[in-house]
Image (cartoon, helix red, strand yellow):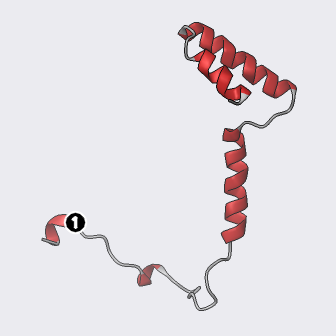
Amino acid sequence: MLLAEVIYEHSLHLPEQAAREALNYIEFLEDRHGIVRSADAGAEDTERFLAAVAGGLSDDFPDDITDEDLGTDVSRQYLD
């Protein structure tokens, strides 16, 4: 079992307030050691994804689409 799993197993038995203190301490250690948490890394992943797909439309995709080319919204009652 990984150390992180052992810590997790122990945390399951802590009262809520003690679990919050443990989390605060872990976040303190992350900051102290310059560790980027996965939630923060997700933003970087999103940026990399957007950079990869930017301009990803094929060459034959029309670049002169105007509002006149778009459809008009119609209430559902008119569709039935």
Answer with the quarter of the image where residue 14 lies: top right
Three-letter amino acid code of the residue under disc 1: Ser
Taking 76 as reference, is 29 above or below it? Answer: above
- Seen in the image, is 41 located left or right of residue 13? right
**Counting other residues with Cα less than 10 Å from the Cα at mark 1, is it few (<14), some (14-19), or many (20 or more)?**
few
Element carrying mark 1: loop
Nearer-the-camera pick, 2 or 71: 2
| Horizontal and vertical percent position of residue 48 | 73, 60
Nearer-the-camera pick, 29 or 50: 29
Q: Residue furthest bottom?
A: 60
Nearer-the-camera pick, 67 or 80: 80
| Horizontal and vertical percent position of residue 70 | 41, 79
Taking 28 as reference, is 69 above or below it? Answer: below
| Horizontal and vertical percent position of residue 77 | 14, 65
Q: Residue furthest front?
A: 1
Identified at 72% across, 45% down, the residue is 41
Nearer-the-camera pick, 71 or 42: 42
| Horizontal and vertical percent position of residue 39 | 66, 39
Q: Which residue is mark 1?
A: 75
- Image quadrant holding the N terminus, namely top right
Answer with the quarter of the image where residue 7 lies: top right
Taking 37 as reference, is 24 above or below it? Answer: above
